[in-house]
Image (tube, rainbow, N blue to C red):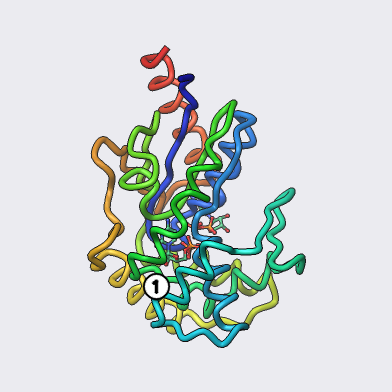
Amino acid sequence: SIHIPVITIDGPTASGKGTVAHRVAKHLGFHYLDSGALYRLTALSAKRKGVDLEDEEQLALLASFLPCRFSRGHVLLDDEDVTDLVRAEEVGVAASKIAVLPALREALVNLQVSFRQLPGLVADGRDMGTVIFPDATQKIYLTASVEARAQRRYKQLIEKGFSANMEDLVKDLTERDARDSARATAPLKPAPGAYILDTSDMSVELAVQTVLDLYAKSAAQVN
Ligand code: CDP
Ligand code: CDP
């Protein structure tokens, strides 16, 4: 079989995974998987259908038939453009609550793996390097201090027209970090062999360049 390169970028909320992954993918002409969007879409869909966030069986069913599409940076659910809506902080919180359920995670595996297509993939999330693409060409664990991340998320939310306050965000982020790291199934942690990149005092540009350099080195070793 042909080897399809994958770069995984895992890390806590607002560490810059999405921004960095998207730019790296664009630079290399690779596909991009925002795995968090799948958990967010499932949470949004559950809310709309009145499915309880603890009903593992129904949530797994929802996730296996998620009527979503990704096109040119837009996310569609049932043909409705929900690109901005899924980024709302309460959808992120709901996503992290349902993400502890093993059956739901299992229901999203095939969809995630199907993004691995030539010429390559950049995938961001929590378990891309540990569970979904354990044979990735280059694994990155992107992180930053809670303060830096809360500031980044604050700016993003305000720019999108959501209301936000720093105190609530720091609390949200800390709780979400704890929930993502402590869960039994696919907890947030650096994958074996992952390069740990702390971007607390780093520009997006430098983070992107660092990932590209690391990938170029590992791709040279594979070929
Ligand atoms: O952008 P942000 O990091 O805040 O969140 P996200 O990547 O969109 O993910 C939302 C939630 O989904 C996270 O808090 C995780 O609990 C969950 N998630 C996960 O469990 N596994 C993934 N591969 C991606 C997201
Ligand atoms: O996907 P994740 O939740 O990890 O983060 P994101 O949605 O990419 O948000 C990160 C935000 O912080 C974006 O607005 C970036 O412009 C900004 N930022 C960054 O990603 N990386 C840095 N080194 C500095 C700022």
Q: Amino acid at mark 1?
A: Leu
Ligand 1 image-quadrant field: bottom left
Locate the C terminus by quadrant: top left
Q: Is 79 on the left or on the right of 97, as rendered?
A: right
Q: Is 60 on the left or on the right of 182, as rendered?
A: right
Residue shown at 47%/74% (left/top)? 59
Foreground residue, 128 or 109? 109
Give residue 12's position: percent from left, percent from top. 38, 60
Give residue 178's position: percent from left, percent from top. 28, 71
Residue 42 figure quarter = bottom right
On screen, residue 38 above or below 204: below
Disc 1 crowd rating (10 Å Cα; few below 14, some 14-19, many 20+) is: many
Asked if the beta carbon under badge 1 is closer than 8 A to the nearest atom of ligand 1, the reply is no
Give the residue pinned by disc 1: 173
Residue shown at 49%/30% (left/top)? 212
Residue 67 figure quarter = bottom right
Residue 175 figure quarter = bottom left
Count of number-bearing discs: 1
Which secondary structure lies at badge 1?
A: helix
Foreground residue, 128 or 198? 128
Residue shown at 36%/72% (left/top)? 176
Foreground residue, 125 or 117? 117
Q: Is 179 on the left or on the right of 23, as rendered?
A: left
The extreme top residue here reads: 223
Residue shown at 52%/50% (left/top)? 111
